[in-house]
Image (spheres, grey):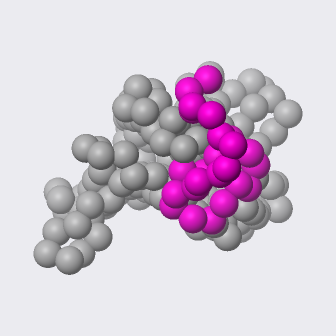
Amino acid sequence: PTLNPNQRTTMKHIQRMIDQHGGYEAVRTRYLRLENPPFMRLVIEVIGGPYPNGAYEVSIAHYSEQNGDAMRDPEITFLVVPSAEGTTWTPLTFENSYLGAYQVVAEASREGLIKVKQTQWMKELRSFAKQWDRNLKAQGFMEVFERQYGAAIGATTEGTVTRQGDGPQGQ
């Protein structure tokens, strides 16, 4: 059976950053932290996997601080399953610290399979994630990624990169 197109690669710009950083294992050891004022810091982390089916659990979050505490606004965790047909990003959880909201919409089994717990929330989170991914590109996070980490695979573990001989960015 074919997947619903809305299920496949809802986070294509995030996926591109992960790929350019060296893949899921590279992001597991060197998470991405993108500073792009005036927007909140964006953090991309691999927090689980690999599962037997090749899936990984990935956290995407905007962070700020309130009274010294890290605040997520929002954080969505996904089960990301790569395949020949394309990568599937399935939302697992949603958190917004400012609203005191935490919602589990699905769980991953030990095999990396999905058990949906809240169908309507899943549909809404898929739609939200797709728009969030488009917004991240429109807000310049792809350019910030290339400035901070370089376009080369696994370019750095530091937040800022200065390479000799680099001309102006912006291809």
Quarter of the figure that contains the C terminus:
top right
Rendered location of residue 138, percent (x, y): 41, 26
Question: Magenta includes 160?
Answer: yes
Q: Residue at x 42, y 47 (%)?
A: 118
In-image side of 39 versus 51 (left or right): left
Rendered location of residue 110, percent (x, y): 71, 67
| Quarter-of-image position of residue 14 | top right
Q: Residue at x 16, y 68 (%)?
A: 66
Q: Residue at x 26, y 61 (%)?
A: 64
Question: Magenta includes 87?
Answer: no
Rendered location of residue 135, percent (x, y): 39, 30
Predominant secondary structure, magenta span: loop
Q: Nearer the viewer, residue 94 or 114?
A: 94
Magenta residues, start to end: 148-171
Q: Nearer the viewer, residue 40 or 2?
A: 40
**Residue 55, visible in the rendered structure:** no
| Quarter-of-image position of residue 50 | bottom right
In-image side of 126 versus 38 (left or right): right
Quarter of the figure that contains the N terminus:
top right
Rendered location of residue 8, percent (x, y): 64, 31
**Which residue, as the protein is rendered here, is positioned at the far front?**
165
Q: Residue at x 76, y 49 (%)?
A: 153
**Which residue, as the protein is rendered here, is positioned at the far bottom?**
68
Number of numbered markers = 0
**Residue 171, visible in the rendered structure:** yes
**Which residue, as the protein is rendered here, is positioned at the far left?**
67
